[in-house]
Image (cartoon, grey):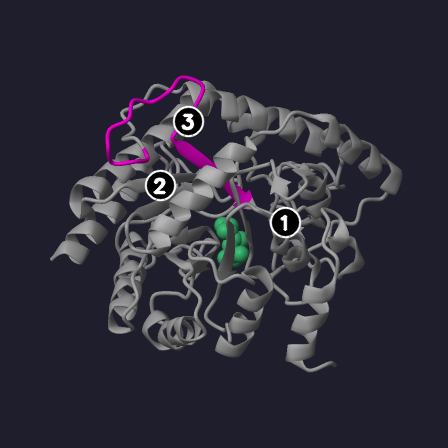
Amino acid sequence: MAPASSIVDTVCMREWHPLSWRGQTVAQDIEYPDAEILEHATGELAKMPALVAESEIEELRTAMTEVALGKSFVVQGGDCAEAFKDIQLEIVTKKRSLLAEQAKIVQDGFKVPVVQLGRIAGQYSKPRSVMKETLPDGTVVDAFRGDNINAEPGNSAVRAPDPERLVVGHYLAAATMSMLRVAKTAAPPADSHGAPEVEGKTNIFTSHEALHLPLEGALTKGHYDTSAHMVWVGERTRDLNGAHVEFVRGLRNPIGIKIGPTADAAKLIQLLSIVDTEKQPGRVTLITRMGANMVSYALPPLIKAVHKAGYRPVWVTDPCHGNTFATPNKIKTRLVETMIAEIKATHLAHRNCDSHLGGLHLEQTGEDVTECVDWHSEGGEYSFPNYRSICDPRLSRQQALRVVKEYVEFANG
Ligand code: PEP
Ligand code: MN
């Protein structure tokens, strides 16, 4: 294998275009049985209207620079995987209002403007650690990869990936966008000066994991990925020389990168030297998801190395993905108290390293679901009367508000 520094040079010298990722290895790739049908679907997508305007992407860039400089804060939240069947006015409005309420709590507590960033209007593709799944009737099928790819869990139909779902997903993302743009909420404006909300303009920005590159490539015009204001690269797809890093490095959109507990400081600096060549504050959001027990050990070396190398990313904590566990009945859940512990430990790690936590990244919904549990139960007995998630467990509205309130009180205390 070539030494890492020469990998960086090789990547940086490559000519970028919206499909240049095709020359690289695609981690978590979907194997479509018929390439022509996929080609047809992406051709349809390329002709469709943008979900977000280039001017809004630029607006978010500016807003994220402010977060990186410590002048504002970001709350990023939404489903692990949005379900097509949940693209309904009431459900979307509740998600939107929740984010607005959380932003208000932070804004009142920290006295800074808050950027509201949904995991919404396109969070339809999922990476997987295990690519097969056993259904309750014992049948082994391909894992569920998100509603944009194949059928949802519980459906015993064969999980063949169907490219037409990408087109359906785009219509549904557009419908969601439309609901967000007209939703009347008590949302505070993104700037602190009280500018009234302009009709047709939303003060919520959208984001999703840029996992499905044929879709993202088809929706990218010039250097703007018009599928969302921000896109991120996941923990499983951030290989320096891989297709996902190749795709995002040329975008004007602010980009996120998930960072797990095994991340290595030197590799992270190489990654930043590929995606943030100008060392622009807020160009990259590092979304750390270490697990509550790992943060104080794994995070400080990364913060120190990144700052020493002259980068000023937005540091966001995702207290969800490092703290998932299965109950004895094999229900995937998370403890809210553990999630809060990760946020607090992350806050302290930054403070001890002359850095600052810039935001929270939460899997949540506005509904009263029972997917995450509030406290540890000695016997491991938990009940889940309203478990609706099609992927990871989400915080309910009450839990999501609790997390934000407890964090703000802690940080101010
Ligand atoms: C996610 O955000 O749902 C996810 C899969 O995260 P990660 O890449 O951090 O595991
Ligand atoms: Mn998830």
Residue 386: image x %, image y %?
Answer: 39, 35
| Residue at (46, 53) in percent of width and height | 329
**Secondary structure of the residue carrying numbered label 2:** strand
Residue underneath mark 2:
115
Residue underneath mark 3:
202
Left or right: where does residue 378 sit relative to residue 162? Answer: left
Question: From where the camera sits, is residue 179 visible?
Answer: yes
Q: Earlier in the sequence, mark 1 or mark 2?
A: 2
| Quarter that holds the C terminus | bottom left
Q: Residues within 10 Å of mark 1 (few under 14, many from 20)?
A: many
Question: In terms of depth relative to the viewer, which is nearer, 102 or 137?
Answer: 102
Indicate whether 378 appears above or below 19.
below
Residue underneath mark 1:
211
Q: Which residues are magenta?
A: 190-208
Q: Amino acid at mark 3?
A: Thr
Q: Is residue 255 magenta?
A: no
Question: In terms of depth relative to the viewer, which is nearer, 119 or 58?
Answer: 58
